[in-house]
Image (cartoon, rainbow, N blue to C red):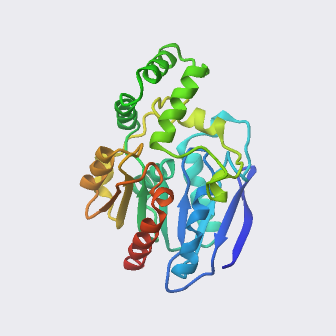
Amino acid sequence: MTIKEGYMPYLDYKTYYRIVGKENKNKKPLVLLHGGPGSTHNYFELLDRIAKEDDRQLIMYDQLGCGLSSMPDDPSLWKASTWIDELIALREHLNLDEIHLLGQSWGGMMVIDYLCAYNPKGLKSAILSSTLPSSKLWGEEQHRLIKYLSKEDQEAIRIAEETNDFTSEAYLTANDHFMVRHAADNPSPELPEPLRRKKNSGSQAYLYAWGPNEYTPSGTLKDFYYVDQLHTIDTPTLITSGADDLCTPYIAKLMHDKIPNSQWELYQHSRHMPFVDQIDEYVPMLIDWLNKHD
């Protein structure tokens, strides 16, 4: 399995990319858009096995503002158009005329925006992994999930939101409990190397584009809303999510109901990353989907 790394010039900066496997004229490459904004490509390395098991090339990259890409100190950059223009530039730079496109969390928001507002060519299929069509709905569902935390954690989050102070120890503990319950485990020696590797998280990108946490969308993406345009998507679309996901079954089903002929796979024992929590079930399902839509 070959791995090629490189950098693409973008704006006045550079974007890191990682290509796994060799080009196969019979199978279109899978391009992966990570979450955050600012979460890095690292967790997608668990999907490297697809290159071997399906003889399919994978392309992942760190979006501007995180990871091995440039991390400029410029809050004006952190808006959806910056990152979608970067995707368009990457497709051109790597001659990616026909692709499958998987976006996880924020990456899925990119896919929805790209499909609905940019009329892209050459998309064989789209995979919306634990994502959202509405920031407002996302915030509402996270606040519903908060009610399942302890009374102490709920109170700490309430005070933080009321005072706009997200620095107290009680709040940080409560938020950690929330994220472990619905997103992912904290790095530990027991986890696969890509999940425990120290990463350059894009904290500025996340704060200015999204907000201080998952349940307080207050940045440039706070008005993200594509619910009423989902019906216009005519690209074959797969939706994946976990039963304990930040992307609640309500959000996932809403997308499934609105996107014509979409397929939804719900993973009973998963949180925000079914391709981590149930990877042995997820990978064969994804390979089957990709082969059906080449």
The quarter in which the C terminus is drawn is bottom left
| Residue at horizontal 55 percent and vertical 52 percent from the top | 84
x and y, in percent, of residue 52 in the image: 58, 79
Q: Is residue 165 left or right of residue 238?
A: right
Numbered label tally: 0
Q: Quadrant of residue 93?
A: bottom right
Q: Is residue 219 visible?
A: no
The residue closer to the viewer here, 166 or 11, is 166
Q: Is residue 213 left or right of residue 187?
A: left
Q: Residue at x 53, y 80 (%)?
A: 53
At 75% from the left edge and 50% from the top edge, which residue is drawn?
Answer: 13
Quadrant assignment for the N terminus: bottom right
> Where in the figure is residue 140, as x and y percent of width and height?
35, 32
x and y, in percent, of residue 78 in the image:
60, 39
| Nearer to the camera, 214 or 188 | 188
> Is the residue 31 above or below the residue 229 in the image?
below
Say whether residue 284 is visible.
Answer: yes
In this rendering, position of residue 294 left or right of residue 76: left
- Measured as percent of width and height from the top left, residue 247 is found at 39, 45
Q: Furthest residue to the front?
A: 190
**Nearest the eye: 276 or 141:** 276
Task: Tell me the residue at 44%/49% (across/down).
Answer: 271
Q: Quadrant of residue 91?
A: bottom right
